[in-house]
Amino acid sequence: MARSKESFNKKAKEQKRLKQRKDKQEKMEERKLNTKKGTRLEDMLAYVDENGNITDTAPDPKQKKVFKAEDIKISIPPGNIRETTRTGRLQFFNQEKGFGFITDNLSHDRVFLHSSNLNIPVEINDILTYDVQAGERGLMAINVSKQDS
């Protein structure tokens, strides 16, 4: 008697494949039934209200505000403007290593000073004028000069 060429494992794989095909077909039919074909454009639109929230209701045209382009000002707020030239007192300077720190007169921040940004000899407690630049580790003084006493 001849053995069957179809083993248990082959039958299980075939049943699994047929089940997946059936599930896929059912999902497709369900999606077709749930689609809303023929919905109106107005139903699909979304609006943004005055607070920036998304709504499905259109804004009231009576409450529309009109702005002139000339009235719009693009600038830095007055409190955020920083002066580029500052003054401060030299608190520490190491001649051998070529660096030091200036304490700013207004903000009392410590600003790093490197000898490459100096063109005059300086001593501790000298009053200096300088510009500030962002360095790798913080503020850095550039264009340094002594202030006339």
Image (cartoon, rainbow, N blue to C red):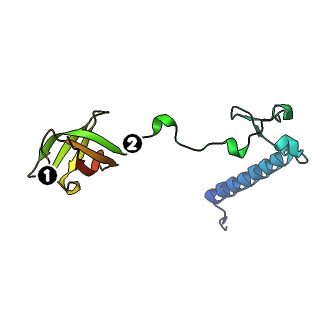
**Residue at point 72%, 33% (across, down):** 50
Quick one: SS at disc 1? loop
The quadrant in which the N terminus is found is: bottom right
| Residue 9: % across, % down | 61, 57
Q: Amino acid at mark 1?
A: Pro
Q: Which mark is residue 63?
A: none
Q: Residues within 10 Å of mark 1 (few under 14, many from 20)?
A: few
Q: Which residue is mark 2?
A: 83
**Residue at point 25%, 39% (across, down):** 88
Along the line of sight, which residue is nearer the eye, 27 or 19? 27
Residue 54 versus residue 17 in the image, above or below: above
Q: Is residue 146 visible?
A: yes
| Residue 104: % across, % down | 27, 37
| 33 horizontally vs 121: left or right | right
Q: Amino acid at mark 2?
A: Glu
| 4 horizontally vs 61: left or right | left
Along the line of sight, which residue is nearer the eye, 110 or 45? 110
Q: Is residue 137 visible?
A: no
Q: Residues within 10 Å of mark 2 (few under 14, many from 20)?
A: few
Pointer 2 with pointer 1, Cβ within 8 A: no
- Residue at the far bottom in the pictured view: 2
**Residue at point 68%, 53% (across, down):** 16
| Residue 39: % across, % down | 89, 45
Q: Quadrant of residue 148?
A: top left
Along the line of sight, which residue is nearer the eye, 28 or 109? 109
User: How many angstroms separate mark 2 from mark 1 (CA)?
Assistant: 25 Å
Q: Which residue is mark 1?
A: 121
| 133 horizontally vs 67: left or right | left
